[in-house]
Image (cartoon, rainbow, N blue to C red):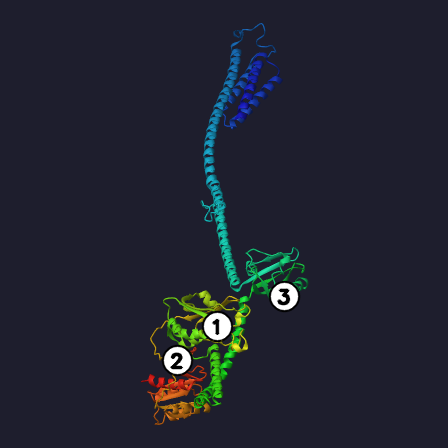
Amino acid sequence: MRLELNSLTTLNNKIDALSVGSDNLVIFRPDDHLWQVFLSDARTIQNDLSELERGKFNAHRAMRHIDQLIKSVEDAYQYLPENNNPIINNSQMNPLSLPLRSRLLINQVADHGIAIESSIDQLMLENQQIIESHINRILFIFMMSTLIFGVLCVLAFNMIYQRIALPTRNLINTISRISQDDDKARAEVFGKDEMAELSMAFNGLLDQKDRFHQQILQQQNELKKQAELLEIAGRITRFGGWSVDMSTKQINWSNMVARIHGKPEGYSPRFEERLAFYIPDHQPHIEALFKNCYQSGIPYDVELQILNSAGEPVWVRTSGEAFRDNEGNITGVHGAFQDISERMELENRLRQSQRLEAVGQLTGGVAHDFNNLLTVVIGNAQILTESFEDSSRLKPLADMILQAGYRGAELTRSLLAFARKQPLDPKPEQIKPLIDQLWPLLERAVGEEIGTKFIAEEPLKDVLVDAGQFENALLNLALNAKDAMPKGGQLVIEAENTHLPEQYAHHHDIAAGDYVVLAVSDSGCGIDADKIDKVFEPFYTTKSKDKGTGLGLAMVYGFIKQSNGHVNIYSEPGQGTTVRLYLPVAIDKTAQLTVNKKDSDTLQVGHESILVVEDDPLVREYVLTQLKALGYDVLSAADGKQAMDILESEQSIDLLLTDVVLPEGFNGRKIAEHALKLRPALRVLYTSGYTENSIVHHGRLDKGVLLLSKPYKREELASKVRMALLTGE
């Protein structure tokens, strides 16, 4: 529009010039050249107007007036006088003086010029209106565009906020929560656009992080469990590790190694101190092993002794090997360290147990035959002693034979007691009455120079024990105490209830539970620390050769262990010794048959029929002689087959007196079982010097079994036979 308006302005100027030109042509009548210029200018203006017409301007009226102007000028140019003088000169200034036709032509030309200018003005006005209209439309469109743009901007901002800013803020808040250790923080997902995908991807990363974290926690828990297991294993086995960096001389100990040395956790010694913990005899050996290891790479594994911080010797197993850098150079030594004191103690106990087992096997092997011989020796020596007059020179010899037989029998019983192969008949017993009954004999045994005292807790629980063997054990302890106090002293026996806990019981190979502990204490010379572990071994004694056999404490030890009890000893040189006997509390207190023992020289005689089964001819002959002398009717058999033949006969038999151990695998127990099937009313008395397992199980006589232990006196034989015969009535 601006270009068209400029064109109209230019046309307006050209028309003004054309109008002036037309006036000049009419008034002054110039030559044809000016006429042609006028026509050319008029045609040019028409062409310009035609262009405006094609530009949708209403220029047709202006073009028509230009045509008419040209025609009017042309007419004026043709019909006016053809002289070259102007129509109006300076002397004729009044137009009314011109001819009418000339005035009409001049007026026509002027009217057309005015009409043309008016048309152009009209065009300019229309153009201005169009421009104004366009401007208004443009302003309207601009305002609407601005409004729409603003709305679009608001919508775009809102969209940007919803799609970018809000999710971004949400991600920032989520990251902030994560930085504050909020493991549950997750970004909220808005819509389904790229930011939503970003939020979902971010959440996926967090989920993956959580999974990795859980896996790490699980691995840490597993490592922690493994570490705890290793700690438990190390604590139970007393096992630890160590390392030495030879470049810095730095030693690192695990906590267990520090504890083994009696040091606090985290302690590690200086390099110069490492040998000081070993006992002097072992220091050169461990130094040579360590030197060969870090110089030549030779590993070592050795058992040595150290002294802990309390000065106590500890057996340890130490092993080491060289560790190298990437180039294969030895840079240090590392290894393991274990406290093996308990193992060494167990091995010592095992070796001792094996020695004792060997003694027990030897004892069991010779006990049967040896007791058979002692039975014959004691029996016949007793007969000889009684048959000689006091004035006879042979009577002292017979007495010596009898006393030697008694000592041999006592020796065999002590060996069997130590080997835990003596037959026990434990019953619920009250300790205090047993000791009260034994007390006069005990006081006579220790002598007047030693004061005695018995202290008992009230009430004491009943114990399960063989009363006779218990009295022998207590008497042995009293005699040992007497020998430890040659110049007199004090013997105190204390009894009280106690309970052995699981930990103590586990370390001393005994069942936990309730016990009655009997402490026998003396104020004697005591026992040296290096000897106290040997006092329960058979034939070990600190006394002179004429003071004992070394079987007293061994017998006590075997009896207590066979009774499911426990014994320990505590002693300090120059202060005295205390031996504690732990006897198991009786659970079943059912009353059992008890036969009173009577110290009487009166022989109990009878008239019943007795079948004696004995494989040793000397013993069999001795028993037959003694029983016949007591008034019994006696039959004999050398083995099980002969015994069964007699039992299956019509012979009257009231008592079966059978040895337990017989040849050909047909022992006394089997004979008794078959005999009772044939003769249900038959009484049975067993005799043996070594019972094996036929009538004794776990060291205890089977219920209802009567046993006459070899060797025995004639009075014991008579008493047991009468007991067996009277028991079945």
Residue 471 screen position, x and y as percent = 42, 75
User: Tag 2, which secondary structure?
Assistant: loop
Q: Report the side of 276 relative to 547 (left or right).
A: right
Amino acid carrying label 2: it is Asp
Sequence-first tag of 3 and 1? 3
Amino acid type of the residue tagged 1 in the rendering: Lys
Distance Cα–Cα, label 3 vs label 1: 40 Å
Camera-near label (3 vs 1) is 1
Name the N-terminal-most of marks 2 and 1: 1
Spatial separation of the CA atoms under disc 2 and disc 1:
37 Å
Neighbours of disc 2 within 10 Å: few (<14), some (14-19), many (20+)? some
Cβ atoms at labels 3 and 2 below 8 Å apart? no
Q: Which residue is mark 2?
A: 702
Image location of residue 51, percent across then percent down: 54, 27
Q: Amino acid at mark 3?
A: Asp
Residue furthest toward the bottom?
Answer: 650
Per the image, label 3 sits on a secondary structure element best described as: helix
Q: Which residue is mark 1?
A: 482
**Viewer-nearest of discs 2 and 1:** 1
Could one spot residue 403 in this view of the protein?
Answer: yes
Q: Of 95 and 345, which appears nearest the observer? A: 345
Left or right side of 87 for 146: left
Q: Label 3: few (<14), some or many (≥20) within 10 Å?
A: few
Residue 698 x %, y %: 43, 77
**Picture residue at 53% right of the left edge, 64% below the top:** 237
Q: Quote the CA–CA distance across marks 3 and 2.
A: 55 Å
Extreme residue in the top direction: 91
- Residue under circle 3? 281
